[in-house]
Image (tube, grey):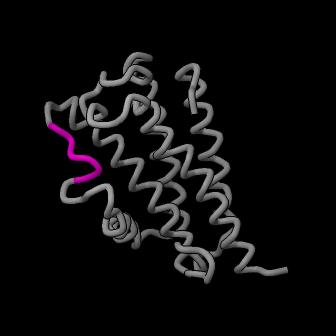
């Protein structure tokens, strides 16, 4: 997870985001809310989860830059009880079609690219440049928060959607 540069971080985000979201292009709209035994989320929930975290992490930085103190993970939520936070992500995006979810995801990745491009290397890679990273261990830089809330889940959720597709269409 140690990135040598901002560009390397951006390249990995974009590569894994594309691999993740491309898994959804062959799904039918009628399948987006289908929960299958053996997979803990529907396809729509998988995308909503990503959208929720992408917006939330960026909001921490936006809040700090606006002079506010970000509450992590979100106001009213604790790190050891994230299920209800995930439910808010699902509820927020439940009215969107599959194509709208895919488009929203792509738009959010563009927003993240612009955000990350605007950050200095010090902000990304030096601990405690942003106050919202201070309560966390030494290795938890802004870049690590970015990785853990983009690259890592893009990879793990790509596996989930692939498993979902295999179970939904056994050959």
Magenta segment: does it hold 48?
Answer: no
Query: Count of labels shown?
Result: 0
From the viewer's perspective, is residue 87 above or below residue 31?
above
> Above or below — where is 171 with respect to 132?
below
Image quarter (top left, top right, bottom left or bottom right) of the C terminus: bottom right
Above or below, 77 relative to 31: above
- Residue 11: image x %, image y %? 62, 31
Which residue is depicted at the point 54% across and 52% down?
153
How far from the left and from the top, in percent, is residue 87? 35, 70
- x, y (%) of residue 95? 40, 72
The residue nearer to you, when weighing 68 against 77, is: 77
Identify the magenta region. 69-74
Q: Residue at x 36, y 43 (%)?
A: 57
* Residue 72 belongs to magenta span: yes
Magenta-drawn stretch, dominant element (helix, strand or loop): loop
* Quadrant housing residue 112: top left
Quadrant of the rendered image containing residue 167: bottom right
On the rendered structure, is 79 left or right of 139?
left
Q: Can residue 54 be seen at all in this image of the molecule?
A: yes
Q: Residue at x 42, y 38 (%)?
A: 145
In this view, 11 is above or below 168:
above
- The answer to whether residue 115 is seen in the rendering is no
Q: Residue furthest front?
A: 137
Residue 129 relative to residue 125: left or right: left
Q: Where's residue 138, x and y in %?
A: 38, 28
**Image quadrant where one finds the N terminus:** top right
Q: Residue furthest right?
A: 171
Q: Residue drawn at (52%, 48%), measured in percent from left and top?
A: 106
């Amino acid at each position: 997870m140690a990135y040598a540069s901002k560009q390397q971080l951006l390249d990995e985000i974009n590569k894994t985001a594309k691999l993740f979201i491309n898994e959804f292009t062959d799904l039918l709209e009628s399948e987006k809310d289908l929960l299958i035994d053996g997979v803990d989320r529907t396809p729509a929930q998988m995308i909503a989860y990503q959208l929720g975290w992408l917006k939330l992490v960026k909001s921490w930085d936006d809040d700090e830059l606006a002079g506010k103190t970000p509450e992590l993970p979100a106001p009213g939520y604790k790190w050891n009880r994230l299920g209800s936070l995930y439910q808010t992500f699902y509820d927020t995006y439940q009215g969107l079609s599959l194509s709208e979810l895919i488009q929203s995801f792509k738009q959010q990745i563009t927003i993240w690219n612009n955000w990350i491009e605007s950050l200095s290397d010090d902000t990304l890679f030096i601990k405690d440049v942003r106050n919202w990273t201070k309560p966390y261990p030494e290795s938890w830089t802004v870049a690590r928060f970015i990785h853990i809330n983009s690259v890592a889940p893009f990879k793990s959720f790509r596996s989930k959607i692939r498993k979902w597709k295999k179970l939904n269409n056994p050959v």
